[in-house]
Amino acid sequence: MPENHNCPRMELARAQRQEDTMVVQVPTSYEYKVTYGQPRRTTGHVYFSPKELKHLAVAVLLVIGVGVSYVLLADGFGGDLILVASASAAVLTASFFVHEMAHKITAQKRGLWAEFRLTLWGSLLTAVFMILPVFFKIISPGAVMISGPASNNDIGKISIAGPITNIIFASVFLAAAFVPTPIYWVFVAGAFINGYIAVFNLIPIGILDGYKIFNWNKTVWAVTFALSVVLTAASYIIIY
Ligand SMILES: [Zn+2]
């Protein structure tokens, strides 16, 4: 063996042997999961994991915070601070929560893994809008993450489920706004916000729902987009 005598180029022999037995180590400072083989398939039941419930709780608190922040604009709503805070928080939380759950339930019913997760930049952006005294807020504390073998048809239907909930909310609120009540402005604002959320999410670019819907079925995209624009415009006309 080279080690047994004073060989001048022994390090070459040693290096060769070490390479043979080298173990490839995965860096432990990053946390990630690797799924080998078939992605997880679920049984088609709606299920919430404990981790998902924690993420949803934080997301809902952030959205409530954004809703309450409308008191900073309360002069424009008639000045009743508690009513403004609670109505805005209720409308925003319902609009956000039902939209995300529509994506999740549609995906889980199709046997896919689907859970809500907070995203760092989305949460920070939402927190910023809690402080900024502007009417147009961005609410994006996280998103439903989906995994599994999904067809183009699955992706289209999962994507359209979210904006459909806002179109329904906007229609119901707009109808309710025609009933003469002291809080009719809550319904007008609710209709406008839901119409605006639908229009925004249906823009056919990037990571938005609209991009996946546009690629799946252009007729469905055009009809839902037009409907959202009409609902938003109608509530805007009533406001002013
Ligand atoms: Zn969505």
Image (cartoon, rainbow, N blue to C red):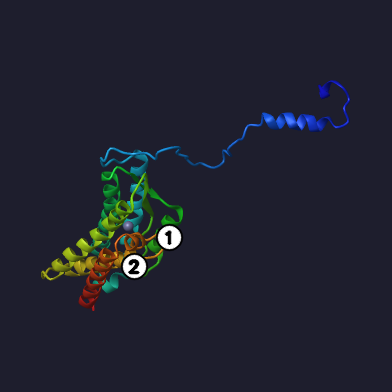
Check contact, mark 1 vs mark 2: CB within 8 A.
no
Read off the residue under disc 2: 72
Q: Can you give x and y, in whole percent of width and height, for residue 111 in the image?
A: 29, 42
Badge number at residue 223: none
Name the residue type under label 1.
Answer: Leu
- Please give the name of the residue rendered at 26% of the width and 72% of the height, measured from the top-left corner: 229
- The quarter in which the N terminus is drawn is top right
Judged from the image, the quadrant occupied by ligand 1 is bottom left
- Please give the name of the residue rendered at 22% of the width and 70% of the height, measured from the top-left corner: 231
Dot 1 or dot 2: first in sequence order is: 2
For the residues labelled 1 and 2, the Cα–Cα distance comes to 18 Å
Question: Quarter-wise, where is residue 126 in the image?
Answer: bottom left
Kind of element beneath mark 1: helix
- Please give the name of the residue rendered at 37% of the width and 58% of the height, measured from the top-left corner: 140
Read off the residue under disc 1: 125
- The quarter in which the C terminus is drawn is bottom left
Is 139 left, or right, of 191 in this rendering?
A: right
Residue nearer the viewer, 43 or 118: 43
Residue nearer the viewer, 128 or 163: 163
Q: Can you give x and y, in whole percent of width and height, for residue 161 in the image?
A: 26, 56
For the question of whether residue 159 can be seen, the reply is yes
- Image height check: is 84 above or below 98? below
Point out the residue furthest to the left here: 179
Circle 2 crowding by C-alpha within 10 Å: few under 14, some 14–19, many from 20: some
Residue nearer the viewer, 124 or 182: 124
- Image height check: is 151 above or below 238? above
Cβ(mark 1) to ligand 1 < 8 Å?
Answer: no
Residue nearer the viewer, 64 or 83: 64
